[in-house]
Image (cartoon, helix red, strand yellow):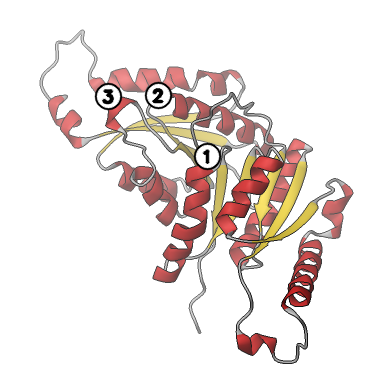
Amino acid sequence: MLPIRRILLPCDFSEFSRRALDHALTLARWYKAEITAINILPPVLTSADSLPHPVHEPTLQEQLLAELRQFLEPAASAGIPVRTAILEGDAVGQILEQARYLPADLVIMGTHGRGGLRRWVLGSVTEKVLRTSPCPVLTIRPAETPVLPAALNRVLCPVDFSESSMSALQQALSIVQHAAGHLTVLHVIEGYPEPLDLVGFDLSIAELMRHLEQSARERLRQAVPEEARRWCQPEEVVTTGKAWQKILQIAQEQGANLIVIGVHGRDPADLMFFGSTTHHVVREAACPVLTIRTEKKEDA
């Protein structure tokens, strides 16, 4: 299990930040974590605010700090430790710096932002944080229908048997245990093996695919520890097609309210993987998506 002790919550007081706070409250209760909420001012606003103010008039930073503390009142009322800060500068840089400084175990943020500023639009701030964050990131998209924040009890975890997806599975199991919920473990076969991989097989394509699906299903079964099966009855699903499309399809069919997915390291090939799979899932999923990153080890 990946511990969650410190949650970083960038917020702009938008609807999406409030939904992110709701999920932060749920996870903070489960894991006994503290929440650090930050609001980030662009340099142009901080420069304007440097002009002299009457003694009785609060500065913009003071106004925002008061608003941020009020925003976090539900956490304080629930007895969850909270910290607040108004920062200045580039949003991405400040979020990543704070994630390393705390250090944060989880960043929770919306994929859209406040009004016309669009400061948190995916493809800008959120996407850059997803690509380079030193810790897992939970992204909250706009919801067409209200989502109960505490109902992170139907979890979908795509697994490709990489180290990152195995870490994602461990975190998914932890969340399901806290939620007393349901877990679906999914493997998507995206294509046929390379010709060299077929040496020794005297099978038709249909037989070969049945063999691959059976093998993947067995690997999924083995991936869930036996002790976890005492409190969780995971459903193993193997299907074929484009990975991100199948992930979204299964999530919708099963009414998932959380997708937990692993992301590989930061070399160009991994960024292509992010762009072709995780990026699509984060963009299109109707539910929150938790991305778990593992770094590739350097060759000795």
Q: CA distance from mark 2 to mark 1?
A: 17 Å
Camera-nearest label, 2 or 3: 2
Residue that mark 1 sits on: 7
**Which mark sits nearer the N-terminus, 3 or 1?**
1
At x 51%, y 43%, the residue is: 284
Q: Residue furthest bottom?
A: 200
Residue that mark 3 sits on: 61
Asked if residue 213 is positioned above or below residue 51 in the image, the reply reads below
**Picture coordinates of residue 267, whole percent (x, y):** 41, 69
Mark 3 Cα-neighbour bin, 10 Å: few <14, some 14–19, many ≥20: some
Residue 135 at least partly seen: no
At x 63%, y 47%, the residue is: 249
**Which mark sits nearer the N-terminus, 2 or 1?**
1
Q: Secondary structure at mark 3?
A: helix
Q: Going by the image, does 181 lie left or right of 9?
A: right
Q: Secondary structure at mark 1?
A: strand
Q: CA distance from mark 2 to mark 3?
A: 14 Å
Foreground residue among 110 and 300: 110
Residue that mark 2 sits on: 13
Q: Going by the image, does 51 lie left or right of 257?
A: left
Under mark 2, the amino acid is Phe
Residue 81 at least partly seen: yes
**Picture coordinates of residue 108, whole percent (x, y):** 50, 39
Q: CA distance from mark 3 to mark 1?
A: 22 Å
Q: Secondary structure at mark 2?
A: loop
Camera-nearest label, 2 or 1: 2
Asked if residue 284 is positioned above or below residue 25 in the image, the reply reads below
Under mark 3, the amino acid is Gln
At x 78%, y 88%, the residue is: 202
Under mark 1, the amino acid is Ile
